[in-house]
Amino acid sequence: MVRDTTSGSVTVPRRFVDGADTRYQAYSYSYPHKTAYRDFPQPVPLKELWKAEKRDALFLYLHIPFCEMRCGFCNLFTTTNPEASLEKQYLDAVERQCHEVAEALGNASFARMALGGGTPTYLNATDLDRLFDIVDRVFKTNPEQAPCSVETSPYTAETEKLSVLKERGVERLSIGIQSFIESEVRAIGRSQDSNVVRRALERLKRFNFPTLNVDLMYGLPGQTFDTWMQTLSETLSYEPEQVYLYPLYIRPLTGMGRQSSGGETAGVETADIRLALYRQARTVLTDNGYQQSSMRMFERRERDSVSKPVYCCQDDGMIGIGCGARSYTSAHHYSMRYAVGQKPIRDILHDYVNASSDSFSFADYGFVLNDDERKRRFVIQSLLQLDGLSFDEYYSRFNEALFSDFSNELNELQNLKLVETVDGRMYLTENGLEWSDRIGFELYSADVKEKMDSYENR
Ligand SMILES: C[S@@+](CC[C@H](N)C(=O)[O-])C[C@H]1O[C@@H](n2cnc3c(N)ncnc32)[C@H](O)[C@@H]1O
Ligand code: SF4
């Protein structure tokens, strides 16, 4: 296990620095994580789940579980190189699911949409077109009305597909690059020719989508300050509007996880320099006009914020379509079953493409959030972002003072100077940002931690 010796002069509690406990504990992009999902006692009709929910600014997420390769670090729900018939069957199932969900929702409108994966641009141009047609026909929405983000990869960001996305009015393209150094991407089980990466970025620039995001990873085996600098400089030469920086996590059940057998940080055998690499990148990006929005996200300052309908992840529900997608009402988070291994993923995919229309009108797997979990979700999602956690918003939402619910946790963070309060809002300090992945995890409930742990040990 990695010992964190990089906390500098700031005092942090023993459990934040001791032995196996590092700051790199869990990426809390959505709480609770899918590994905490379980079968519901009985299937619940979607109509019932959504009837009392606010439905005027929903997020529509379409999941495409296909990739041209399975990267050694990746635990996303995806499979490689499916036979062409599976893609068609998949879109047929997506269409059936959309109809059932639209029927259950009744009157609803969408503020944002996203195509994620996997790699949505694994689909050919005709299938991508079909996907937008389905959404338009069934949900009466499109990227012109609901700003749309699409994930892509260097090998699949091809001209014909990008043309479809451009014509449809997609706002944001996000491409996973990870590193320009070929030996580094090879070491994380991703065979990627850097010239292919360069050509993909040049194409993306020519299409001139309003927002180009580039995903990079740090802490890769063999990565040094010099090679990281090379990757950052080359990335900046394309002037992306956004850059996401991900610390490498080696998770159980992934290719790298199986090799290193144990724990999120196992396998990072040499000194763990993730924090130093993060600090280096933060300096480079902020010196180049990027503003930090969270531990991972950096955005160019001059970029106008998209002023179309605003989706608020704290208030507005998510409709997930596809077999790796989650949906959220205020109390129910649900999805198809989750898996990382290829065999169970294929089985779930098989069930999905063969599912009857009727089966799409129920939720039977997920997590039911009680009041305590809703509060935790709100605190985690707010505190880890630039906008911070508002005391008033907390009170008006839960009719309780923030500090009476989370006094131990927040006092501790405050004493450690990991957070600061300005005008009734609590923000992460610069030091706190570096501890984001630990702070989020510390706020998980015992129930969620226990479920995640028993999932990973299954
Ligand atoms: C859906 S993928 C990106 C899209 C596309 N499939 C690709 O790989 O190019 C989302 C991003 O999360 C990051 N990521 C995924 N798993 C990670 C891990 N175990 N550790 C660090 N970053 C990870 C990677 O930067 C990746 O590009
Ligand atoms: S990182 Fe991207 S390309 Fe690689 S397996 Fe995951 S989703 Fe697919």
Image: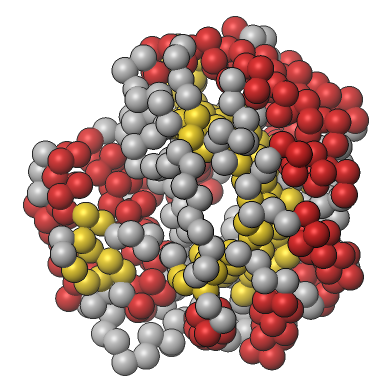
Colour treatment of the image: secondary structure
Relative to 316, is 23 above or below?
Answer: below
Residue situated in front as seen by the camera: 206 or 443: 206
Relative to 423, is 100 above or below?
Answer: above
Report the side of 106 relative to 446 (left or right).
Answer: right
Residue 255 in view:
no
Relative to 40, is 287 above or below?
Answer: below
Q: Which residue occupies 61% across, 35% down?
A: 144
Report the side of 340 relative to 433 (left or right).
Answer: right
Image coords of residue 95 (percent x, y): 69, 18
* Quarter of the figure with residue 242: bottom right
Q: Which residue occupies 30% across, 60% down?
A: 388
Image coords of residue 448 (percent x, y): 37, 44
Relative to 389, is 165 above or below?
Answer: above
* Quarter of the figure with residue 397: top left
Residue situated in front as seen by the camera: 430 or 260: 430
* Quarter of the figure with residue 48: top left
Q: Which residue occupies 85% across, 36% down?
A: 125
How many numbered marks have been drawn onto this rendered protein structure?
Answer: 0
Residue situated in front as seen by the camera: 42 or 329: 329
Image coords of residue 151 (percent x, y): 68, 49
Image coords of residue 436 (percent x, y): 39, 66
- Classify the position of the C terminus by image quarter: top right
Residue 289 in view:
yes
Q: Which residue occupies 15% across, 41% down?
A: 396
Question: Looking at the image, which residue sits at the far top?
Answer: 358
